[in-house]
Image: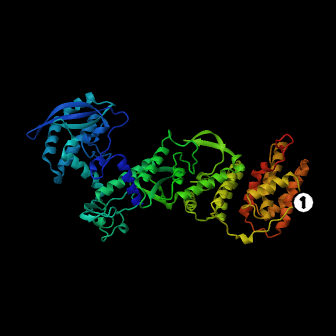
Amino acid sequence: MIEAIRNIGEYALGKEEKNVDNPLEILIDNPANKNTKNILFILLDEENREFKYHGIETEEYSKDKLENYLYKKGTSRGTDITPTVMITTPEKTFNNKILNWFKNYNSDKNNKNEMLQNIYLCIKENKEKILQDLKEKSDIENNIISFKINEKYLGDFEIFRKILVNKASENFYNKFGKISKSENKLCSICKKNNTEVYGFVSTFNFYTVDKKGFVSGGFKQRDAWKNYPVCLNCALTLERGKKYLEENLNFNFYGFRYLLIPKFIKGVKKDIQKDIFKKIELQKDPRFRKKEIKNLTNDENEALETMSEQGNYLNNNFLFYSAPKGFNGAVFNILLYIEDILPSRLKQLFEAKNVVDQEEIFQNCEIDIYRDRKKIGKGPLEFNFGILRTFFPRITNNRTFNKYFLDITNKIFTKKPVEYDFLLNFIVKKIRDDFMQNYPTKIDTLKAFMLLNYLNELNILKYKKEESTKMEKSILPKEIGGEIKEKTEVFFDKFSNFFDSDIKKAIFLEGVLAQFLLNIQYQERKANPFRIKLKGLKLDEKQIRKLLPEIQNKLEEYGKNYYRDLESIISNYFVSSGNDWNVSNDEISFYFVLGMNLSDVFKKEKNNGGKEDE
């Protein structure tokens, strides 16, 4: 991973025309915000080592002068790295960020400098006049303060440039009250001897030296450089790579975030690498984003389809993380790291998605479509990882299923088997909850069937029962015919992997018949009293056998038993199945409710081409 991040950093620095051998141009920050138009300069003249204050000068801000301004953000409670600062209020900023900067620097015995001492004395002596002048000129557009000394910027003075580089890079070797660096040692990343190497370079805090187990050299933190020595150039390149990842390859994923980290195979030309990074950058720009892009996630900036179109000269690494204190905060938890996913594997994921998305039963299932959490209309059900998330939510009934969700996500990417029985158990629990709360079950049931079809298309759905245990499929007698027979055969052929035994067909069709009865009851009574017979979808073999005659009797009572052909087909499948069903109760419940929610597929056609309103 580190090598991949370094490579990304090299690309980003090259794009910005920055040279890692000049750390200053990498380390400086841009002090401007959206309101900035001008910079206020405190003018000082120096003669014979004495400094005089000459007023405040307003100069138009220019991004081309960042090295002149020499700004580097510090801590929120302390000073910035240099005395170029952003204004909150003139008095507060001058006292806390400017006066304190010179005071703190001069109080350090190791950093005594006559020039800085004399500047401090000058601005302290002229404090009231400087504050008065600043208040007159500062406003929302004039919101940055810096210095000019003898008409020169801070960036023109070696002392300030050196301070910025030293202080900004201090985090690489100064932590926990310890200094960890060494001279003329080999960098573990570039494999070159360097003037200095540092021991506290932890790009994502997954390498840490605040715990003994991570430190070699007798567990002494000052010797951490022996464990992971990194030179300044590589440390800065890694930091720029991290920043590029944050800005361009950082995506939402159903309550998580992940970094997509491309790693190129050795020998791939830089031009090819640049081309791929440019495609990723364009993908985030709505002006150039492909209109017909197909997403596997809930992030409209997702780059997976773009990466799936590349050759197998790179691997895609996925780092799923949580950062409760921000991307650059002290806490960075790696939840899942998926390595070495080839573009060809991503292509398989999209091809499987395309297959299931084209199925008519899913295209006819309309769901609400959201963008930026706003409903923008309706559209057909399409596969993405949100389908999986439906059955492994972040929180339900005070439990979280994040671990299972990420585990199955990992298996999908890495082509590892997903346990059918395990998955079906969670599916049925969700649908039962819907059913018991009188919520519609159709969308969740079809999402479940879509998920199973998707995993089956990827050939990673693992059954406990071997193929040899599946029952022989019976041939329906010729006297059982008509439109319903043709429809059932077409449907079962289309989804033959899931209807590989007559008992599954029987249970499914009994669900169809049950829904026909519920439809009739609602037409007649505006209620579904038969619903209670379905036992909250906690069905087993005994209940399924009992339900068929009960449904038939109710249909006869209403005088609307239009489904005798369907009943004959169900009975025939039951007979051919015998007494050894070899299906779990979860399967029984799922196939039954699937039949209920696909009952429209088996309605009789009206003479005018519509469907009968049963």
Q: Name the residue under label 1.
A: 478
Q: Foreground residue, 537 or 418?
A: 418
Q: Residue 231 appears in which quarter of the rendering?
A: bottom left
At 82% from the left and 67% from the top, the residue drawn is 577
Dividing the image into 4 quarters, which one contains the C terminus?
A: top right
Sort mark 1 into few (<14), some (14-19) or many (20+) by Cα contacts within 10 Å.
few
Which scheme is used to colour this image of the protein? rainbow
Q: Foreground residue, 155 or 548?
A: 155
Q: Which amino acid does label 1 sit on?
A: Lys
Residue 364, given in percent of the width and then of the height, sits at 71, 46
Compared to residue 400, the image places residue 221 above or below, namely below
Residue 99, given in percent of the width and then of the height, sits at 21, 41
Q: Is residue 325 visible?
A: no
At 28% from the left and 45% from the top, the residue drawn is 80
Dividing the image into 4 quarters, which one contains the N terminus?
A: bottom left
At 40% from the left and 49% from the top, the residue drawn is 244
Q: Give the structural element (helix, strand or loop) at label 1.
A: loop
Q: Is residue 72 visible?
A: yes
